[in-house]
Amino acid sequence: RNLSCTVENLNPITEYHYLLTSYNNDNKALTVSAGNFVTTDDVGIDNPLLVNGIWIYPNPASESFRIGGITGETQVTITDVSGKTLIKRTVAPNEAVSIQHLPKGVYTVRAGETAIRLIRK
């Protein structure tokens, strides 16, 4: 069975953590679910900023970005719109990835098997 809820007035490109508990008619807890999500920004990109539990922040970025949701060292590849590999390196959790040498534009960041679009502003 799927449950859902709506939360309003969230900030764009912000990580939120949640804890949801469902109760029966006797007010006994049935299920508890915890997790996190990142809100998106209206940047005109058709890909969400959160994919397979992995996200890029900030996005758009100007000098560097970080990858959230990775728990260990992860192979990261950045390609341009033609598919040309521009950066390929191993990234640790919370490590900044410099993109200041890249021109403004849209790139694909692959973290392991997950691909997310990144805007360099």
Image (cartoon, helix red, strand yellow):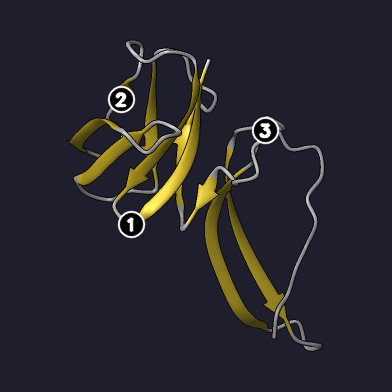
Label 2 Cα neighbours within 10 Å, binned few <14 / some 14-19 / many ≥20? some
Q: Position of residue 16 (x, y in %)?
A: 59, 44
Q: Position of residue 32 (x, y in %)?
A: 58, 73
Residue 101 vertical placement versus 66 (above, below) = above
Q: Which mark is residue 96?
A: 2
Amino acid type at mark 2: Ala
Amino acid type at mark 3: Asp
Q: Which of the two discs, 2 and 1, sits closer to the camera?
A: 1
In front: 120, or 52? 120
In front: 60, or 68? 60
Q: Which mark is residue 32?
A: none
Q: CA distance from mark 1 to mark 3?
A: 23 Å
Q: Secondary structure at mark 3?
A: loop
Residue 76 lies in quadrant: top left
Q: Residue furthest front?
A: 82
Residue 31 vertical placement versus 108 (above, below) = below
Q: Residue drawn at (35%, 45%), measured in percent from left and top?
A: 110
Q: Position of residue 38 (x, y in %)?
A: 58, 43
Left or right: 19 as drawn, with respect to 77: right
Q: CA distance from mark 3 to mark 2?
A: 20 Å
- Decide which of tag 3 and tag 2 comes sooner along the chain: 3
**Residue marked by disc 1:** 113
- Decide which of tag 1 and tag 3 comes sooner along the chain: 3
Whether residues under marks 1 and 3 lie with C-beta atoms below 8 angstroms apart, the answer is no
Residue 73 lies in quadrant: top left
Q: Residue drawn at (59%, 60%), measured in percent from left and top?
A: 19
